[in-house]
Amino acid sequence: MKKLIIPIVAAAMLLGFTECGKGGGGGGCNETVMTVASIPAANSTEPASPGPDFPVQVNITANKPTGGVNIEVKAREESKTTFFYNSGVVSSNSNTNNFTITGTPATVVCVVEITVTSKSCATNKITLSYKYSKK
């Protein structure tokens, strides 16, 4: 009897774990993944510049959800976890979205984190980042 119980329990656990992995979270959806780019480019390190303000452009280049997106742009010193700039969540139906980072500290490398999330499918989310610094 013991030999029969162990395989049954193992099969039930395997089936349970397999089912948990299905879907994409947020109830799952079939929305096509959007393509997002930024200026400055994602994964780049910009040369130091005088500032004081730093423009960021977030472009949805393909598959923009018909219901629009939420965009958040945040900036922090590379060595810290707290953000000195946060745009807050900005609702948009536009392909081109402009932000201006303010309050950048001088002479330190900073990281910009951009998150674009579909309003109709929370799992359709793109995250970009790049580095820059103020002279």
Image (spheres, rainbow, N blue to C red):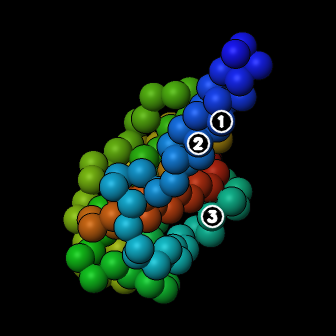
Q: Amino acid at mark 3?
A: Ala
Identify residue type, mark 1. Answer: Ala
* Number of other residues with Cα within 10 Å of mark 1, as a class: few under 14, some 14 to 19, many 20 or more: few
* Residue at (68% x, 59% y) in the render: 43
In percent of the image, x 63 and y 64: which residue is there?
42
Q: Position of residue 122 (x, y in %)?
A: 35, 58
Q: Nearer the viewer, mark 2 or mark 3?
A: 2
Which numbered disc flags the more N-terminal residue, 2 or 3? 2
State the separation of the CA atoms marked 1 and 2. Answer: 6 Å
Mark 2 sits on what residue? 15
Which is nearer the N-term, disc 1 or disc 3? 1
Please report contact status of discs 1 and 2: CB closer than 8 Å, yes or no.
yes
Q: Which residue is mark 3?
A: 42
| In contact (CB < 8 Å): disc 2 and disc 3 | no
Whether residue 61 appears in this view of the structure is yes
Instruction: Tell me the SS state at disc 1.
Output: helix
Residue at 62%, 55% in the rendered image: 130
